[in-house]
Image (tube, rainbow, N blue to C red):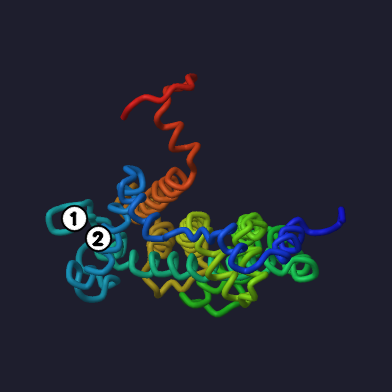
Amino acid sequence: MSATDPSEVVILAAADMPEKELRAASPRRRARPEGLVRSLLRNRKAFAGLIILAGFILLALLAPVIAPGDPSIITGQGAQAPSAEHLFGTTPKGQDVLALTLWGSRSSLLVGFVVGLAATAAALLVGLTSAFFGRAVDDGLSLITNVFLLLPGLPLLVILAAFLPPGLGTVMLVLTITGWAGGARVLRSQALSIRGKDFVAAAIVTGEKSLRIMFREILPNMASIVMITLLGVVIFGIGAQAGLEFLGLGDPSVVSWGTNLYWASNDGALMSGSWWAFVPSGAAIAFVAFALALINYGVDEVSNPRLRSARRRPFGTGTEVAR
């Protein structure tokens, strides 16, 4: 018995109970994602992060209206400081920095969110499958996950990006391949903990299909950790894309925050003191990462009762104080 999975003990014990008693004794506790969203909107940190992120998304959508035409076209003299004519100045080539920054947000945010969704979906599928089926499936998927975790991330990114054809699709593929494994390990641990609960055992005994149990019983109770994983991968995607493109491993014809930094470096903006050529794109990356980190912290604060109670206590005391 010592080698038996603890969740199997729960299932064996539950198998002897009538179905009505089993359902009454082990109610299904499904988390409501809409409740998490409402809690986030009431959390000051998460709300501030959402406002900042929404502002960047709005600017990206309005880029064709605010700066119509080709953002790479030369519109003035090179290396002009910010002025009424060019609010963010011009690059050493004479391109408008504001237009490049606005249009660059479209591809950078697109890559970040696509990579976040794809890598989180892969991590979630691997984590749920590994935790639910266990044994040989768990061993095999855990081995694959550990191999990807042991591979050095930056060299792997550089090698894949260098040998694949340049383009946004390549960047998304490379970042998804290198970004799913860390989330898979975290999600597997969470799913494994939930799998041992009584309501999951009740669903197994009553004959529910495996996919239904995984996605209707286990997954809703992982909403907060899935969102945290997603936000972390989005930050990774935006930062890693900018890093690859800054190294010249992206498509230089695509306007993004990373390519803006690449061309600013190639054109000697830093050496000539033209700080306005690279500061807007670098600041945009920093602010988006800051906004996602605020949302991430808000999710953690909302979903973790210990953090909520700690906010209501003065440091070093055990008594709660009113807000």
Report the residue at 28% width, 66% height from top: 60
| Residue 209: quadrant of the picture | bottom right
Q: Position of residue 71 (x, y in %)?
A: 27, 71
Q: Nearer the viewer, residue 166 or 271?
A: 166
Camera sees residue 94? no
| Residue 135: quadrant of the picture | bottom right
> Local crowd at mark 2 within 10 Å, few (<14), some, or many (≥20)?
many
Q: Which residue ends up furthest to the left in the rendered image? A: 84
> Local crowd at mark 1 within 10 Å, few (<14), some, or many (≥20)?
some
Left or right side of 102 for 299 = right
Question: According to the image, label 1 marks what residue?
Answer: 87
Question: Which amino acid type is marked by label 2?
Answer: Leu
Report the residue at 61% width, 55% height from top: 190
Q: Secondary structure at mark 1?
A: loop
Q: Nearer the viewer, residue 50 or 211?
A: 211
- Rounded to the nearest angstrom, the CA distance separating label 1 from label 2 is 7 Å
Q: Position of residue 104 (x, y in %)?
A: 34, 66
Camera sees residue 123? yes
Q: Secondary structure at mark 2?
A: helix
Report the residue at 48% width, 68% height from top: 117
Q: Position of residue 22 (x, y in %)?
A: 62, 63
Left or right side of 193 for 269 = left
Quadrant location of the N terminus in the rendered image: bottom right
Q: What is the number of callouts on the image? A: 2
Quadrant location of the C terminus in the rendered image: top left
**Contact (Cβ within 8 Å) of mark 1 with mark 2:** yes
Question: According to the image, label 2 marks what residue?
Answer: 98
Question: Which amino acid type is marked by label 1?
Answer: Leu
Instruction: Return the disc, 1 or 2, that comes first in the chain's sequence.
Output: 1
Left or right side of 130 for 45 = left
